């Protein structure tokens, strides 16, 4: 069985595709089947999310491209940007993952959220589409990397002094 464990930026040749819905692209340990029919094991660092187009490789140096599978989603559109922003606010307030597109939001199919969005005046259309939600404010891609290989999600103060009412000035 092919084992994939390393992301790479570029490849001249792609041996196969790994087509997965978002739920499986969030897992750090996964057994799946490639487009060629071959079994594959994927091992990534905890917290890694595989994105559409990512390239993975393993010991034998074959390169596999990750493809976001179409899945049950809702495409949310509004008559104006302000209304769409209100919808995004209410989805975020419910900690709902959202794919932000040009003039639309996409969420996983959820009838309760569909009804809420319709109540806000949005047009909500069921569709089968790749789901690529935002990674979040602390989802990586920034430069706070330590020399020890650890990559904190936000800057960590060296020392914080807690002031208590009884402390001397």
Image: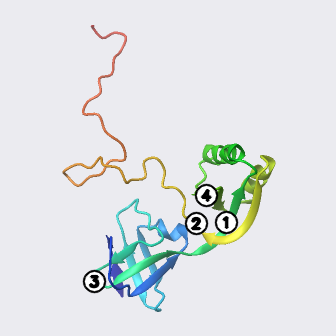
| Residue 155: % across, % down | 32, 40
User: Is 97 rendered above or below residue 27?
Assistant: above
- Measure the C-alpha gap from mark 1 to mark 4: 16 Å
Question: Which residue is drawn at the image coordinates 39% and 76% (left, top)?
Answer: 42
At label 3, counting other C-alpha atoms closer than 10 Å, the crowd grade (few under 14, some 14-19, many 20 or more) is few
Query: Which residue is labeled 3 in the image?
Result: 61
Q: In the image, what residue occupies the spot 70% across and 70% down? A: 127
Which residue is the site of mark 2? Answer: 131
Q: How many other residues sit within 10 Å of disc 1, few (<14), some (14-19) or many (≥20)? A: some
Q: Which quarter of the figure is the N terminus placed in?
A: bottom left
Left or right: where does residue 150 sit relative to residue 43?
A: left
Question: Between marks 1 and 3, how big is the CA–CA gap?
Answer: 35 Å
For disc 1, the marked residue is 73
How far apart marks 2 and 4 lie (CA) works out to: 14 Å
Give the position of the C terminus as an image quadrant: top left
Identify residue for label 4.
Answer: 102
Q: Nearer the viewer, residue 107 or 94?
A: 107
Q: CA distance from mark 2 to mark 3?
A: 28 Å
- Residue 163 against residue 71 in the figure, above or below: above
Closer to the camera in the image, 100 or 147: 100
Label of residue 116 in the image:
none
Q: Position of residue 150 (x, y in %)?
A: 26, 52
| Mark sitting earlier along the chain (2/1) | 1
Mark before the other along the chain sequence, 1 or 3: 3
**Cα separation between marks 2 and 1:** 7 Å
**On the image, which quarter does residue 66 sit in?**
bottom left
Q: Position of residue 68 (x, y in %)?
A: 53, 73
């Amino acid at each position: 069985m092919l084992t994939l464990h390393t992301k790479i930026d570029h490849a001249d040749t792609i041996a196969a595709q790994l087509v997965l819905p978002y739920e499986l692209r969030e897992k750090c340990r996964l057994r799946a089947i490639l487009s060629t029919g071959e079994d594959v094991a994927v091992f990534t660092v905890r917290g890694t999310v595989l994105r559409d187009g990512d390239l993975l490789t393993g010991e034998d140096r074959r390169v596999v491209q990750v493809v976001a599978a179409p899945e049950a989603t809702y495409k949310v559109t509004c008559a104006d940007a302000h209304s769409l922003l209100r919808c995004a606010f209410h989805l975020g307030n419910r900690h709902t993952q959202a794919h932000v597109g040009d003039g639309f939001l996409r969420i996983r199919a959820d009838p309760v959220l569909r009804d809420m969005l319709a109540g806000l005046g949005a047009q909500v259309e069921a569709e089968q589409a790749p789901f690529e939600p935002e990674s979040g404010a602390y989802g990586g891609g920034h430069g706070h990397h330590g020399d020890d290989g650890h990559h904190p999600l936000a800057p960590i103060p060296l020392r914080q002094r807690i002031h208590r009412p009884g402390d001397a000035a």
